[in-house]
Image (cartoon, rainbow, N blue to C red):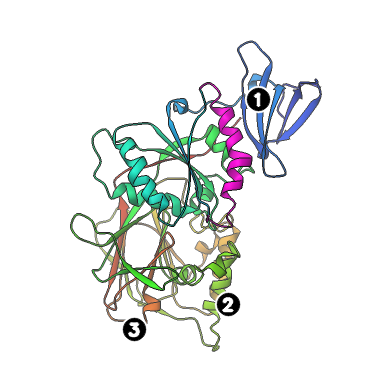
């Protein structure tokens, strides 16, 4: 049998014993060519145990991985292992899967890397400010391999944007390995399209600028921390305006409520299921009443326009602006969004019953079919503004979600969201095909 022909979803090769072996493409990280003129190469693939296998094989040059278009050998490597993300598996993944792949990829130089394990919720912000920012601001080439949820990327973004860059600033390249609960960014850039958990994108991905948005808040807005037991002031920009940056979602209404209510140690034990559990509690109140109708004035500037337009209702169920397509692997909130395309899209609908809300959002798990519903608004926007105007007395209904961070506004408070023009990170996305 010809060992030089990849066939469909299978890669064929001969091992050192001249025995034919097969590897599913979904498990293939990369194929590294051997010395010029030699048959022997390295096939790197994931195993059923969650580790990686690196085999010396004889394989056709036709299936060698194209090397990344950027000079990855020249980059200073920092690995950040978020020890508390998701179900706390990042450390195990690094030692069993990622570290062997790094050694194989960087075999041409003495392999060395800087590995950082998080010790608190502030570790990534502190590491970015104290270590990564000075190097990037001096123009050094950085590759940051981030084993965390979306929050790790957002921590880097906000720490970078808190500084004024020099003309020498060079955006670090970031490889995202999804170790959190939702992992919206990873799902939206193609990291989870195969079985390698991001290893194939590290080996064969293309760096693209990470689109981000800026949310500015009314003066009395406060960030809720420690499972909402404490409040903290928000960062302020050069004008003294409270603000946060995000790369995934700004939401108010049902989405923000379920994120906030499920952000506890007890809920996090259930992984992504925590969102569904919280949603059922919010949509079916224990007293048998209907779900809360969220009250505020919502306005937008649509793509290509310059004037504010009001959403024609003052009561809402769901208001969510996003830069990504997926909030979970199969939850397609914005099917028109392409990886890192920079378009801010709004999904919204008004008050409804718990059953109807569950039906509508269930359609998002069917490839984003919820946007076909007459009751659902879906549009490409430049800006979003939510103004409470004393319409909500209870602070529970004035919570805003910015990429998982919860901000509570005053009774007359407001938030305004727009795409940020500054570019601080490149993200590895869309692995080249073999």
Judging from the image, what secondary structure is the residue with disc 1 in? Answer: strand
Q: Nearer the viewer, mark 2 or mark 3?
A: 3
Q: Residue 316's image quarter?
A: bottom left
296 w.r.t. 2: above or below: below
Q: Position of residue 35 (x, y in %)?
A: 61, 14
111 w.r.t. 376: above or below: above
Can residue 343 be spotted in the picture?
Answer: no
Foreground pick, 425 / 318? 425
**Disc 1: which residue:** 42
Region in magenta: 84-109
Residues at marks 1 and 3, CA–CA distance in whole angstroms: 63 Å
Residues at marks 1 and 2, CA–CA distance in whole angstroms: 53 Å
* Quarter of the image that includes the C terminus: top right
Can residue 370 be spotted in the picture?
Answer: yes
**Disc 3: which residue:** 393
Judging from the image, what secondary structure is the residue with disc 3 in? Answer: loop
Foreground pick, 410 / 143? 143
Give the mark nearer the N terminus: 1 vs 3.
1
Q: Is residue 93 magenta?
A: yes
């Amino acid at each position: 049998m010809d060992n030089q022909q990849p066939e469909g979803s299978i890669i064929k090769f001969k091992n050192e014993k001249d025995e034919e072996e097969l590897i599913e493409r979904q498990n293939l990280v990369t194929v590294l060519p051997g010395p010029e003129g030699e048959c022997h190469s390295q096939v790197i693939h994931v195993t059923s145990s969650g580790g990686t296998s690196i085999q010396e094989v004889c394989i056709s040059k036709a299936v060698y991985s194209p090397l990344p278009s950027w000079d990855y050998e020249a980059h200073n490597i920092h690995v950040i292992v978020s020890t508390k993300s998701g179900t706390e598996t990042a450390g195990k993944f690094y030692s069993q899967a990622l570290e062997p792949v790094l050694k194989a990829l960087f075999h041409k130089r003495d392999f060395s890397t800087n590995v950082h394990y998080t010790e608190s919720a502030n570790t990534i912000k502190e590491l970015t400010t104290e270590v990564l920012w000075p190097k990037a601001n001096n123009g050094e080439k950085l590759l940051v391999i981030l084993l965390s949820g979306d929050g790790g990327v957002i921590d880097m973004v906000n720490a970078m944007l808190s500084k004024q860059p020099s003309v020498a600033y060079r955006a670090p390249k970031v490889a995202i390995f999804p170790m959190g609960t939702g992992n919206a960014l990873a799902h939206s850039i193609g990291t989870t399209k195969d079985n390698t958990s991001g290893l194939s994108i590290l080996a064969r991905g293309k760096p693209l600028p990470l689109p981000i948005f800026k949310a500015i808040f009314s003066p009395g807005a406060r960030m809720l921390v420690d499972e909402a037991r404490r409040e903290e002031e928000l960062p302020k920009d050069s004008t003294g305006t409270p603000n946060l940056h995000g790369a995934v979602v700004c939401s108010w209404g049902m989405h923000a409520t379920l994120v906030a209510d499920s952000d506890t140690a007890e809920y996090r034990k259930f992984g992504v299921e925590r969102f569904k559990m919280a949603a059922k509690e919010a949509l079916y109140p224990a007293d048998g009443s209907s779900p809360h109708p969220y009250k505020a004035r919502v306005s937008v500037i649509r793509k290509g326009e310059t004037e504010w337009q009001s959403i024609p209702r003052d009561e809402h169920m769901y208001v969510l602006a996003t830069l990504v397509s997926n909030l979970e692997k199969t939850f397609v909130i914005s099917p028109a969004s392409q990886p890192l395309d920079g378009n801010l899209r709004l999904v919204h609908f008004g008050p409804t019953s718990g059953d109807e809300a569950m039906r509508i959002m269930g359609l998002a798990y069917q490839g984003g079919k919820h946007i076909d519903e007459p009751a659902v608004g879906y549009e490409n926007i430049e800006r979003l503004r939510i103004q409470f105007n004393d319409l909500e007395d209870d602070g529970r209904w004035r919570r805003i979600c910015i990429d998982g961070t919860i901000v509570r506004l005053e009774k007359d408070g407001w938030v305004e969201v727009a795409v940020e023009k500054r570019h601080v990170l490149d993200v590895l996305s869309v692995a080249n095909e073999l």
